[in-house]
Image: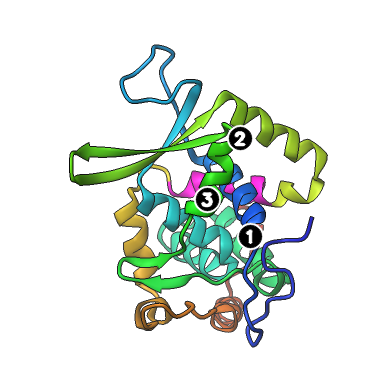
Amino acid sequence: MSSPAEGVGQESVVSPTSRMQDAVRLLLLIDGAAEDLPGSACVDVPGGAVAVLRSQMALQALDFWLRNPDYFANWLLDLYEKTRDYALLVEAERIMDSDEPEIRSYLMLRYRFGAYEPVDGSLSVLAGAGLVYRRREGSAGHTKQHNYYLTERGRQVARELIGEVSELDYYVQRVGLIVRVTEGLTGSQLKAIQYEQQEYLETEWNQRIRPIAARVRHRIAAMQADGVTVGKDGR
């Protein structure tokens, strides 16, 4: 299976993914990022649900980093500079030394509250198969947030897909890393971090948020020129 944006480079015209590709990516994202539900049944929780990813804002923010390796690598560099955790620097360098930013990127639209893509179509595919259900939280006429419930069947299908299509392991590993470094952050906090990038902030509504791969590679080169090295005595 090809990546959602195979062949999309910094100067390329962005080709939309298919509804099925989006559905698979979102299934793997929700499977990896959702928190397990307690064993006892809860009110308004779909039958068979085993985990939940809370809020559309969180889903869109996590998907943005999944679809934009250059922006994710840049944030790993920010985290490295705060924590001096060399594992973050190693991963950022690995991403930018590869062709991920060119062949794994699928640019998102800039909308009122940041990066956004309609997910109704792909969610309908998942809901129709009994894999993921979206539920609105709030009062009548006022939606507080959307929650995304992964069912036991959804978890099983995700595992089957990973086993059958080796290329999907990329998304599993990347979602795992994204989840680890965003632990404890809300959707609004994730969006605020992404807004710190000028290219993201200045993109006009309904336009694709442009890549920053060249800038991130230049940043890494400057860090290396300043004597930042990786993997030497863990310091």
User: Spatial distance from mark 3 to mark 1, Cα to Cα?
Assistant: 15 Å
| Amino acid found under the numbered disc labelled 3 | Ile
Q: Say what secondary structure mark 1 lies in.
A: helix
How many discs appear? 3
Q: Which residue bears the numbered disc 1?
A: 90
Which numbered mark, 3 or 1, is in the foreground of this view?
3
Query: Is most of the magenta stretch helix, strand or loop?
Result: helix
Tell me, yes or no, if residue 139 can be seen here: yes
Which numbered mark, 2 or 1, is in the foreground of this view?
2
Q: Which residue bears the numbered disc 3?
A: 178
Asked whether disc 3 touches disc 1, contact meaning CB atoms under 8 Å apart, the reply is no
- Earlier along the polypeptide chain: callout 3 or callout 2? 2
Report crowding for label 2: few under 14, some 14 to 19, many 20 or more residues within 10 A (C-alpha): few
Looking at the picture, does residue 98 appear above or below residue 151? below
- Quadrant in which residue 196 is drawn: bottom left
| Amino acid found under the numbered disc labelled 2 | Ala
Q: Which residues are magenta?
A: 171-182
Q: Which mark is residue 129?
A: 2
Quadrant in which the C terminus is drawn: bottom right
Tell me, yes or no, if residue 235 can be seen here: no
Magenta segment: does it hold 75? Answer: no
- Earlier along the polypeptide chain: callout 2 or callout 1? 1
Quadrant in which the N terminus is drawn: bottom right
Which residue does the image show at 40% across and 75% down from the upper left?
197
